[in-house]
Amino acid sequence: MEANYIVVRFGELTTKGKNRKLFTQKLLKNTKEILYEFPKLQYHLQYDRLYIYLNGSDHEAVNEKLKTVFGIHSFSNAYKFEKDLHIVKDAIVHIIDEDTRTTFKINTKRSDKTFPGHSQDINREIAGHVFHHVHRPLKVDVHHPEILITVEIRHDAIYVMNNVIKGAGGYPVGIGGKAMLMLSGGIDSPVAGYLTLKRGVDLECVHFAAPPYTNEFAREKVFDLVDKLRHYTHGSIKVHVVNFTKLQLAVYDHCDESYAMTVMRRMMYRVGEKLALKNHCLALVNGESIGQVASQTLDSMQVINEVIRIPVLRPVLCLDKLEIIDIANKIDTYDISIRPHEDCCTIFTPKAPATKPKSYKAKAFESHFDYESLVDECVETVETIIVDNSYKKDENIF
């Protein structure tokens, strides 16, 4: 017996009061975009549920895609029946008969209060029918059942479910505006991007390349990371590749080695802010974690952050490395991030960077060269690429 529906539950979205419809409509739009490869699906959005009619589509394949949709608390494969309890009881017998486990529970939710009987009475009636028609030993377990059958009696139909699949949680991507992710190619920044998407903020990415010091393998690494992240969105992410070589070399020519990393990060923030504003992004996002490297002490962050006005989101700020790695493994970016191809931050790492830099010293070093024109040149010559379903089919990306 194959499920013919999927019932989607909203979770956190149910707390949104008057804005609830805005959130659920955005969730519906995102769900359709992520499930684009299943054209037969039909969608019916109600106040507290989204019903997806499978119409012959493979429910297991649809399940895997639904797990990546932010805004979904949980979902279940379901069987839809007309509002006749006799039909429902026979169907539940069939479902349990196909299973081999021996403890079960019936959990009825009667949204349609005009339907005769109370939920507990219906539970007992269905359970009694199961005992009389399933020809193997069975036992009711109300606390830890092996088989949990949920019966939702709604105004349009009765839905029967025998599984609950955890969703991605969070908010629908895009409901919270858009931000610019500073994507290095390391472990932390893709995780920061994932956590930002989970809170409903859409992303574009900026990557700082320094050819010929960084190579095409480092570039491919970054696009492979974006390809993983895009599966949690509407299916595509725009990437801005900045040629940072000239500006980076100027920094190292005019700065004391101990301040080179601080000044370089200040330059990245300036370029990132200009690109963010140009592309209607409301904030920068990065993978900074307190104390992890010299540029991520609070003193360093304060001096680096002062050169821009837009907010900087740091989703992994208070996570330790092992926690970040756990998330990276979960979203399948870890193995990509540890490929041995360096980005422009790692190839020029000074031996003794300042961990408590002073703003006046950073400004003094910056006064030695015309960094503003170099920042503008980075923005004007940026290469913009969209990573979408055609990724790796387009030979021009590399």
Image (cartoon, rainbow, N blue to C red):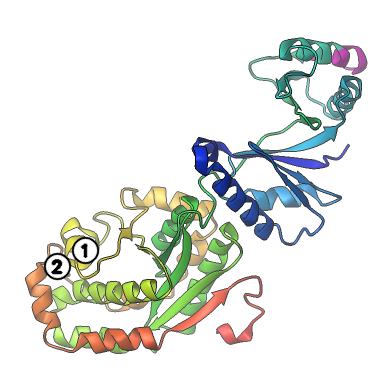
Front residue (pair 384, 142): 384
Q: To which residue does mark 2 refer?
A: 354
Asked whether residue 342 is in view, the answer is: no
- Crowd rating for badge 1 (residues with CA inside 10 Å; few <14, some 14–19, many 20+): some
Q: Are marks 1 and 2 in contact (CB under 8 Å)?
A: yes
Establish if 210 lies above or below 38.
below
Asked whether residue 354 is in view, the answer is: yes
Residue span colored magenta: 129-138
Look at the image and tell me in which quarter the C terminus lies: bottom right
Residue drawn at the location 72% of the way across and 15% of the way down: 119
In primary-sequence order, the first of circles 1 and 2 is 1
In the picture, measured across the screen, residue 44 lies left or right of residue 96, that is: left
Q: To which residue does mark 1 refer?
A: 294
Establish if 332 lies above or below 91.
below
In the picture, measured across the screen, residue 108 lies left or right of residue 317, that is: right
What secondary structure is found at the residue carrying circle 1?
helix
Establish if 199 lies above or below 127.
below
